[in-house]
């Protein structure tokens, strides 16, 4: 399946795609993953999804004032601008062509609602947002409680130098973890863009910490469905990767680094199916330990035993529903009860 980028003609002018004629839809917000990889986000403007906007690449070439062939990009304001091919601050906003979208099986595509009158469809999956249960995932990771899907995502690991234009590509792989049926990756920020302090905030309204490890949740990709058959990703999904290592855009698109990154992306968005089986014992133990620690933390901040009782009760019932077999359900139920009793005895 071929994934590509928008061109200048598809974004700007009279012949632009209908979706791109809307100022807010032409702008793009960035996923949390793109920000952690060094994407440039500015707080001056917002996209149609009411999030801060970022820069993204388009597949076009124009000469600058020095007669050098530069790449095209769309700025935070939605304007077309030029960028050095070696830049790392522009994000990647993938596009599916009409040939590709027409070949997709209907059962693989889901309805994602409507955004400013444009249909949104869900197809494929990719790491996007910061996980809301990061503390629990850290505990499970330390207890070796994840199932490995066998899938790995690959991003550039080159850190930001003075201009972010060092011609190099050093891929780093991030394995995908499965926990209670949901997928995650574990990643540290490759680089952090300092143009705008507000632009360094993630979707959870927390500031990016350069040396912190983050859990990013794998989620369905949202595509804006244009009448022409093109599907455009609602957000910039990746960043920190050069369009090409050459100083100028002097080769065909198929010979650029960006073309290779998009080929990798097309494979990465396919979900790896895991066999149905009883959850491994490490996962059960890790979940019990995680809930015990969460219970203790809640007892420290909540006055009264009644609220803590309700928390333990909710955890227990929720866990039982998430298990595959009654025997595993009983293990989890007994584990939560023991954790609850232990918490009471220690008067945490």
Image (cartoon, helix red, strand yellow):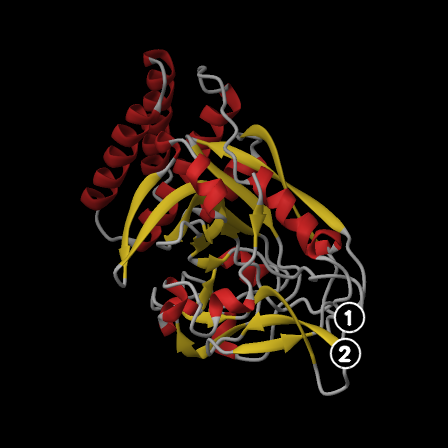
Query: Front-most of 114 and 281?
Result: 114
Image quarter hosting the N terminus = top right
Task: Say which mark, if any, is on residue 40.
Answer: none
Local secondary structure at mark 1: loop
Task: Say which mark, if any, is on residue 248.
Answer: 1
- Name which of mark 2 and mark 1 comes first in the sequence: 2
Mark 1 crowdedness (10 Å alpha carbons): few <14, some 14-19, many ≥20: some
Above-or-below relation of 215 to 54? above
Does the residue at mark 2 contact the one at mark 1 (Cβ under 8 Å)?
yes
Query: Front-most of 127 and 246?
Result: 246
Q: Position of residue 183 (x, y in %)?
A: 48, 37
Quadrant assignment, res 309 = top left
Query: Front-most of 59 and 318?
Result: 59
Residue visible at 41% across and 66% down? 20
Question: Which residue is at the far front?
Answer: 15
Q: Is residue 224 visible?
A: yes
Using residue 61 as the reference point, say whether residue 298 is left or right of it: left
Quadrant assignment, res 244 = bottom right
Q: Position of residue 105 (x, y in %)?
A: 40, 31
Image quarter hosting the C terminus = top left
Task: Say which mark, if any, is on residue 68.
Answer: 2
Question: Which residue is at the far left?
Answer: 306
């Amino acid at each position: 399946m071929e994934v590509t980028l928008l061109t200048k003609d598809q974004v700007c002018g009279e012949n632009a795609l209908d979706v791109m004629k809307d100022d807010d839809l032409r702008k793009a917000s960035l996923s949390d993953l793109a920000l952690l990889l060094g994407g440039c986000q500015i707080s001056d403007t917002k996209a149609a999804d009411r999030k801060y906007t970022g820069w993204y690449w388009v597949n076009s070439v124009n000469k600058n004032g020095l007669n050098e062939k530069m790449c095209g990009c769309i700025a935070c304001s939605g304007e077309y601008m030029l960028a050095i091919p070696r830049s790392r601050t522009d994000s990647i906003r993938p596009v599916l062509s009409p040939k590709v979208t027409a070949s997709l099986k209907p059962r693989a595509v889901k309805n994602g609602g409507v955004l400013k009158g444009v249909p949104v469809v869900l197809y494929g999956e990719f790491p996007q947002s910061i996980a809301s249960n990061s503390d629990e995932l850290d505990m499970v990771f330390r207890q070796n409680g994840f199932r490995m899907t066998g899938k790995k995502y690959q991003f550039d690991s080159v850190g930001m130098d003075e201009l972010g234009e060092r011609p190099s590509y050093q891929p780093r792989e991030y394995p995908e973890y499965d926990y209670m049926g949901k997928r995650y990756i574990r990643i540290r920020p490759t680089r952090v863009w300092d143009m705008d302090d507000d632009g360094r905030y993630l979707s959870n309204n927390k500031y990016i910490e350069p040396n912190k490890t983050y859990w990013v949740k794998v989620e369905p990709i949202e595509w804006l469905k244009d009448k022409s058959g093109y599907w455009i990703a609602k957000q910039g999904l990746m960043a920190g990767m050069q369009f090409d290592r050459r100083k100028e855009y002097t080769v065909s698109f198929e010979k650029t680094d960006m073309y290779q990154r998009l080929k990798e992306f097309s494979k990465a968005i396919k979900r790896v199916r895991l066999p149905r089986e009883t959850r491994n014992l490490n996962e059960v133990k890790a979940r019990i330990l995680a809930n015990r620690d969460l219970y203790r933390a809640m007892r420290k901040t909540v006055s009264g035993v009644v609220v803590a009782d309700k928390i333990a009760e909710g955890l227990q019932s929720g866990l039982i529903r998430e298990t595959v077999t009654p025997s595993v359900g009983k293990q989890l139920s007994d584990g939560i009860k023991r954790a609850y009793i232990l918490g009471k005895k220690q008067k945490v």
